[in-house]
Amino acid sequence: MILVSVTMHGAARSMDFILDSGAGGTVLAKHVATELDLTLTGRERVRTVNGVETVSRAADARLFLGDSSRPLRFSSAPLVMDLTRESRSLGTRIDGLLGADFFDGRSIKIDFKSSRLRLSPSERPGQGAIQLPLSGGRGGMFVGITADDHSLPRVRLDTGCRRSLCWTPTGGSALPVFWRDGKTMKVDVNLGSLIVSAVPSDVYRRPLFAGEDGLLGTGLLSRFDSVWIDSVNQWVAFERLRN
């Protein structure tokens, strides 16, 4: 997982947020809202991997990255949710998620090699980088890839997913009767002209989310020195694949 150190107005400590492009919006953990005595507004129902939850928003939350004196801007106030399960899964306290709205209107470089997150980097991807079109909608960002001989035109770019690839083959309902959802198999993945061989992937009989072909997670993304996500010009670039 990609953990980002975030500063919040009124907090006496730095916060650990998961960089999660698969989440529709930025999220604060309930314990953070309580710790900072934030004002919660409204009640709405949102879809999560655990089902549908009723949540509120923290309109007065102000988040900062690095040494910037300007708070991050989002399309709407962060959601407030229980992140106990995520904290338990990672074995460390998780204070929030930087969701797809964090990427909106920004150019971001995830530098896995140096463990840095760079906003509006001055440099550009190198000549050998593989660049793919990026599309939006449904609270996420999507790319088209191929897994073995299956064309997957709408795969969610999910930096909050620890796996490499979760997908449904074309005609997934025709999988063997004994097939267990989430079973892992190795496939060759085409990212444009680049073939990444023997990628462990979790295969499902039916799509995880309606209208989508799967999730492309950090298990594969982190095999590159860096991944660039530019929602302004709508492209994603993969730079220097490591063995």
Image (tube, rainbow, N blue to C red):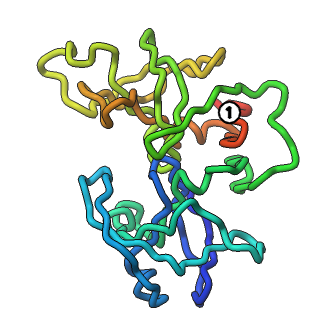
Residue 184 visible at all:
yes
Q: Point out the residue furthest to the left here.
A: 177
Farthest residue in the front direction?
A: 42
Is residue 226 at all visible to an observer of this figure? no
Residue at label 1? 235
Q: Nearer the viewer, residue 47 or 164?
A: 47
Binning the other alpha carbons within 10 Å of mark 1 as few (below 14), some (14 to 19) or many (20 upward) gives some
Residue at the image point whose x is 75% and y is 55% from the top = 118
Q: Is residue 86 above or below residue 100?
A: below
Return the x and y of residue 123 as percentages of the image width and height: 87, 44
The front one of 85 and 210 is: 210
Q: Using the image, determine if residue 7 lies above or below residue 211.
A: below
Given residues 183 and 6, the one toward you in this image is: 6
> Residue at the spot x=50%, y=62% of the render?
26
Residue, far top? 149
**Taking 152 as reference, is 75 left or right?**
right
Does 144 sit above or below residue 49?
above
Q: Is residue 122 above or below residue 241?
A: below
Q: Nearer the viewer, residue 192 or 176?
A: 192
Place of residue 236 in the rendered image (x, y in percent of width and height, measured from the top left): 66, 34
